[in-house]
Image (cartoon, rainbow, N blue to C red):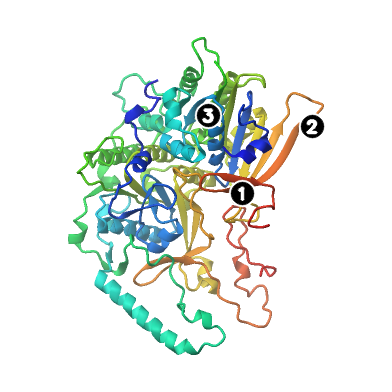
Amino acid sequence: MAASMGRGRGGVTSFQKKARAKTLQIPGTRPSSQGNQLLVSTGVPSLDHIIGGGVVVGTVMLVEEDSFGSYARLLMKYFMAEGIMTHHPLLLSSAELHPKQLLSDLPAPVSDDIGKAALNQEEVSLEKNVQKEATMKIAWRYHNLRTEQPELGAFSQFGHYYDLSKTMSSEMRDTAPTRLFYLQDELPLEKQGVWTSITNPAYIKLLQSIQDVVKEGQFDLTVPQPKDVPRTVLRIGLHSLGSPLWGEQDSGSSHDSSLPHFLHALRAVLRTSLAACLITIPTHLFEDMAFTRRLEKLCDSVIRLESFAGSEKEQNPAYKDYHGLLYIKQLSQANCLLSYMPDCNDFAFKLRRKKFAVEKLHLPPELQDSQQREQDDPVAALKTPSASCFNPSVKSKLDF
Amino acid sequence: MFTELNVILGFDHLKPPKGQFVLISDSLTDGSFLIHHFLSLYIKGGWKVCLLALAQSFGHYNTVGQKLGVHLTQAREKGQLKFIDGLNHSLQAYTCTAQDGPDENPLRCLRDKKATLRPLYNLVKTHVCGEEGVLEGPTLLLVDDLSLLLSLGVPVKDVSDFVHYCRVLMCPSQQSQGAMVSLVHKDADVEDEENSSLFRHMAYHSTVHLAVEGLSSGYSRDVHGQVTVTFRNVQDPSQPQTRKRRLQYKLEERNVSFFAPGTSRAVL
């Protein structure tokens, strides 16, 4: 009975404490617009903007991987790099490549001088454009606006800018305490009797190590902390969970409850800790959509990446500026009545030489005067029927 | 507590109705705002509430409850609210080792295939009943949510047995003292046989069914979805068996506004 009543007076969850201690200032986080929750940046400012400011501390963000996993790996690297820049301790787990390999290839931050110089250059070129178009007579209201597609939320302050062409130096990397969990090092997993026949022991081991880090690093909010100890947020990155190397049998049928149980227990740990978690799962490997849906319901925020590499969409002229689509499937509803509602749900990402950015999907304008054949029309080819609430915009000739 | 919804449901906010088995189902969207509605409605109505929370922590319900005007920590201290922390039990079931003593965990079926949900039912019964084993005074059992039990690996048969036992305990007839509210996920675009068979069992027994879904025309910022309310009339065979009402809703910071389809403030 006592256990079921919760932890009683001492059992304070993370969000209650923040309500009382209004000055819980942790570097690298900012309060969310909905209520008193903390957000941490994903490392990509445009992605932060569309998911409502960042990843909510105490929740799990799921990234459903693209077919080759490269962009999901990139997002994980950004998340870890952002943690190093803000001095958040990291916990990284992976099964296929050693976490050290992931960490050795983080994007280098753009230093302030270079960042400001770039901004200055942009302003100078903008002024030149303005001078050239100062004689706009008809559309004169618009000549002060930028001529190119602006990135979403490019001027937020708690995210950092990174340069993908350079790697973060090892000195900078070593400043942040990191814990690594490499599945191959943990083998052979100790037998736990009857329990292992029901559930995957690899996930149990992973959860135990997460719990250990939370306890040792004093991220647990149920344990009262002395006032002078500065608090910080733990960033947990679980790369490519649920891949065949983790022991997922039957390509993830809905009868195997190991991964859902792991996610449920992870939620229990995170709700009372100062930690934010980013998980990437290759859901395209699962045959059963119902299993994927169950995993999504157990995570708080879910986005899905779909890259054009190797698919017929690569040749589609409508998508020529982008490398893939990004779908927001769910946003965190922890401690609020409603989640952040974006304006639209058509986002695409592109990977330029130096950075990865997410933008609203804009189809190119139709410049031909003559009526094209239906087969040649790239816009019509984008019709994808879907019954979901987040419906990509269906373009038909009747729309205006 | 959303007053417009109370009017539509015919629930009096001063005297919430007894003997109701309310089923909330959601498809491709999140229907948990209705859980908060019923929680605040029955707490404000002075009922004893037993909240079996599998999906979220106590802090979540407390924070949202404060926005809706109920103080859950106070209710818990006074004894009006009994909170069963499903997240914690599941975590303990996950991380316990074979060396630990005899298992007191109500969710031990998650690690022991031979156990059913009976320990969980016994726990609910101890919270809800007095010494004689019957309900003392109006009591509500709120389950959030049942599909999670399926995701965690509990067989459909065990979950529907559990629901049946709880229903017989709380609201076997319209005149009984208790009521029960539960949430099931029923996504229209995936074929989840376990969820749909559980949903059908529950819909058969329910007196009021609220189906939450997104708009068929797609995502909109001003109208977040629609709720279809189905009343099942089990008493009077001469009257039509089911009555349906359809409403659209918009979630806001502290409230959810319900309106007839097409009359959203953004449209008019």
Earlier sequence position, callout 2 versus callout 1: 1
Which amino acid type is marked by label 3? Answer: Ile
Which type of secondary structure does the marked residue at label 1 adopt?
strand
**Dots 3 and 1 on the same chain:** yes
- In this view of the protein, can residue A117 be seen by the observer? yes
Above-or-below relation of A209 to A243: above
Disc 1 crowd rating (10 Å Cα; few below 14, some 14-19, many 20+) is many
Identify the image quadrant of the C terminus of chain B: bottom right
| Dots 3, 2 in contact, CB < 8 A | no
Judge from the rendering whether residue A357 lies leftward or rightward of residue A319; answer left or right: left
Which type of secondary structure does the marked residue at label 2 adopt?
loop
Q: Position of residue B122 (x, y in %)?
A: 48, 18
Earlier sequence position, callout 3 versus callout 1: 3
Q: Which residue is mark 1?
A: B225
Q: Position of residue B52 (x, y in %)?
A: 48, 29
Q: Nearer the viewer, residue A137 or B211?
A: A137
Whole-angstrom CA distance, mark 3 to mark 1, is: 26 Å
Whole-angstrom CA distance, mark 3 to mark 2, is: 32 Å
On residue B43, which mark appears?
A: 3
Which type of secondary structure does the marked residue at label 3 adopt?
helix
Q: Which residue is mark 2?
A: B240
Q: Nearer the viewer, residue B44 or B146?
A: B44
Q: Chain of mark 2?
A: B
- In this view of the protein, can residue A187 be seen by the observer? no
